[in-house]
Image (cartoon, rainbow, N blue to C red):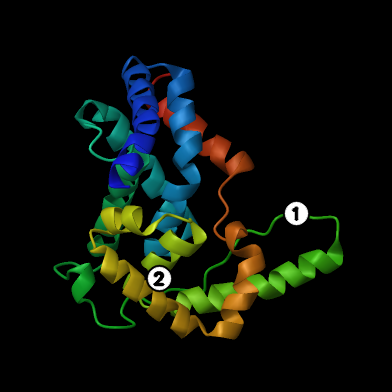
Amino acid sequence: MRQAHVTSLLPIRAADAELVQRALARDEAAIRTIMQANNRRLFRLARGILRNDSEAEDVVQDAYMRAFTHLDQFRGDSSLSTWLSRIAMNEALGRLRSKHTNVEWSELPKGALEAEIIQFPLSSTDDPEKSMAQREIQHVVEHAIDELPEAFRLVFITRVIEGMNVEETADILGLKPETVKTRLHRARTMLRDNVERKIGPIVMEAFPFAGRRCERLTEAILKRLGITA
């Protein structure tokens, strides 16, 4: 059973290797493909740590620059997406720690990192009722996620909103799979059943990072890399 799982990963890893080789040769299409496939995930992870849109976007840009200038260090031990996610998280945590000099993130007391309520960009719609309902539910999402302690919020965003599996979440966050499961269960308990039911219909629209924002970031990185003018 385990062997089948490993075998199923081979085509994905092979595709990663090909993209990396092309990106190392400064192939613009390959670099675009890598970023467009990972922009939303990296933004959500950085946003989950920093709870600030502009800072998260800055972190994603810095993470890509670090990744693309050290792409020869990618060994394929994990997926390219996981490798990029770790870089983005390290960048975000580094920025967070810089605000709390000489204090480790994991040692901060509860509430020490509480920030302003998350403001989700809303999707444009021609349906006023749908738009209003979406805003109401997103308001619940904002408060519910904002109230989660840092460690639980990251697991919730990674597992539920981003949809990563337990193993990948554990790999990215440096946790044991059992810890991921325990924290997710605790996060859901804190969010309460009625809140979680409201999250369901729009959870994949939380922390959006697509369209013009995705394209803008991609173009900015290409320019910083000197690929485009």
Q: What's the amino acid at mark 1?
A: Ser
For marks 1 and 2 on the same chain, the one whose residue lies earlier in the sequence: 1
The answer to which of 185 and 203 lies nearer the viewer is 185
Residue 70: x and y in percent read 23, 30
The vertical placement of 168 against 151, above or below, is above
- Most extreme residue toward the front is 1
Residue 124: numbered disc: 1
- Secondary structure of the residue carrying tag 2 is helix
- Secondary structure of the residue carrying tag 1 is loop
The answer to which of 95 and 205 lies nearer the viewer is 205
Residue 100: x and y in percent read 23, 69
* Residue at x 70% of width, y 70% of height: 135
Q: Rounded to the nearest whole Å, what is the CA distance between mark 1 and mark 2?
A: 27 Å
Within-10-Å neighbours for mark 2: few <14, some 14–19, many 20+: many
**Splitting the image into 4 quarters, where does residue 18 fall?**
top left
* Residue at x 42% of width, y 60% of height: 158
Q: Which residue is mark 2?
A: 153
- Most extreme residue toward the left is 102
Q: Is residue 54 left or right of residue 123?
A: left
Residue 63: x and y in percent read 33, 42
Q: What's the amino acid at mark 2?
A: Arg
